[in-house]
Image (cartoon, rainbow, N blue to C red):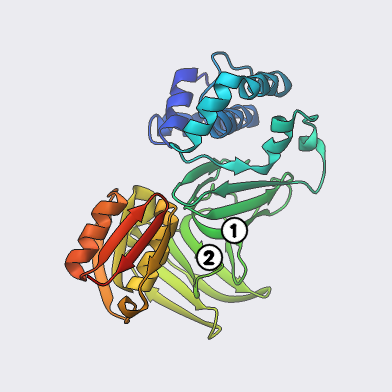
Amino acid sequence: MENQVPIHNIIQNIASNGVEYAKEIREWLDDSNENKKVYQDLLEIWHVTGSFPEQFSPNRPKAWLKVQQHIHSPKRKYFLYRRIGQIAAAIIVVFLSVWTGTELNIWKQKNQYTEVFSPAGQKTRIILPDSSIVLLNGNSQIRYSRNFNDGNRNVELMGEGFFDVRKDLSRQFIVRTSELDVKVFGTSFNVKAYENDQNVEVGLKNGKIGIDRNEKAIAQLTPGQVATFDKKEQKLDIGEMDINLVSAWTREEMVFEEDSLEEIIKYLERWYGVNIQVAPELLNGELLTFKVKTESLSELLKLINILKPIKYHIDGKQVIITKP
């Protein structure tokens, strides 16, 4: 590693979700592929165990032997279960082999995929092999090939993710969803493509992106534009919007602008990881507008009650909302 960075700085960067030492770590990642591998290993160890090893070796087999021993410790298991409830833990399919103790040689196999799932109520940050950064919202998943750096950089998305793509004019970056494909070379944008939502939404922060459907180019976006594809009507609309509102969730903010209670409830279920039952008479099409930042579910429901009178009961992960 040419540009040495203190391991403490790397750990602080990962634990702070990329906020601390951001510039220093970005420059270090750009120095070599070995640095990227070291960072990815530490990031994945954090996701799996919720902590970092006391000593870390860039040697992958040795490092993962330590992780395996770390996981199988009875005391560590208790900490892991508790930690998963506290942090945005990613469920990474590749680590199933670590958990079961099987031989960890799948990095060398072809046509293998890495899948990352962000559970409802949590957010998960991923560093891709090309150093592009993805932040997944709750109840979202991405999948990419182990051969990600060979040819075009392809990622499959189900749910919502904010992408900060490293510029590479020789290799296109493609986000594939069930309805649309987003193609870029290097830019920042938000994609929202939940399976049970009526619309797929793409918002561009900077740069330029192309949108394809069924292998055919259908639109190009410039900064500040949002494309909304209606699955039922099979129609694409493009409009101007403050991208900071579209990506507000990445800053722990919820912004609703003329949204129905039904749409808001669906969003809250993903945000807090709960199941909400609403009395049908409350779903009357009335539109609400408000903005909140990192409020508890109880506090947010109190706010909704001011805008639209409701009565609610919270029992663990179950929430019932009725008329007062």
Q: Can the viewer see residue 21?
A: yes
What kind of residue is marked 1? Leu
Residue 63 at what x, y percent from top left? 66, 20
Left or right of 16, for residue 60: right
Residue 178 at what x, y percent from top left? 62, 68
Q: Which residue is mark 2?
A: 193
Quadrant in the picture for the N terminus? top right
- Residue 20 position (above or below residue 311): above
Residue 286 in which image quadrant: bottom left
What kind of residue is marked 2? Ala
Count neighbours of disc 2 (C-alpha within 10 A) and say few if under 14, some if 14 to 19, many if 20 or more.
many
Residue 86 at what x, y percent from top left? 43, 36
Q: Residue at x 57, y 56 (%)?
A: 185
Left or right of 135, for residue 111: right
Q: Can the viewer see residue 208?
A: no
Q: Residue at x 54, y 55 (%)?
A: 140
Quadrant in the picture for the C terminus? bottom left
* Residue furthest to the bottom: 233
- Residue 275 position (above or below residue 129): below
* Residue furthest to the top: 55
- Residue 276 position (above or below residue 37): below
Residue 30 at what x, y percent from top left? 55, 34
Comes first in the chain, label 1 or label 2: 1
Q: Residue at x 58, y 26 (%)?
A: 77
Left or right of 236, for residue 260: left
Residue closer to the observer: 294 or 273:
273
Mark pair 1, 2: CA separation: 7 Å
Residue closer to the observer: 186 or 95:
95
Q: Are marks 1 and 2 in contact (CB under 8 Å)?
A: yes
Q: Which residue is mark 1?
A: 157
Q: Residue at x 27, y 50 (%)?
A: 295
Count neighbours of disc 1 (C-alpha within 10 A) and say few if under 14, some if 14 to 19, many if 20 or more.
many
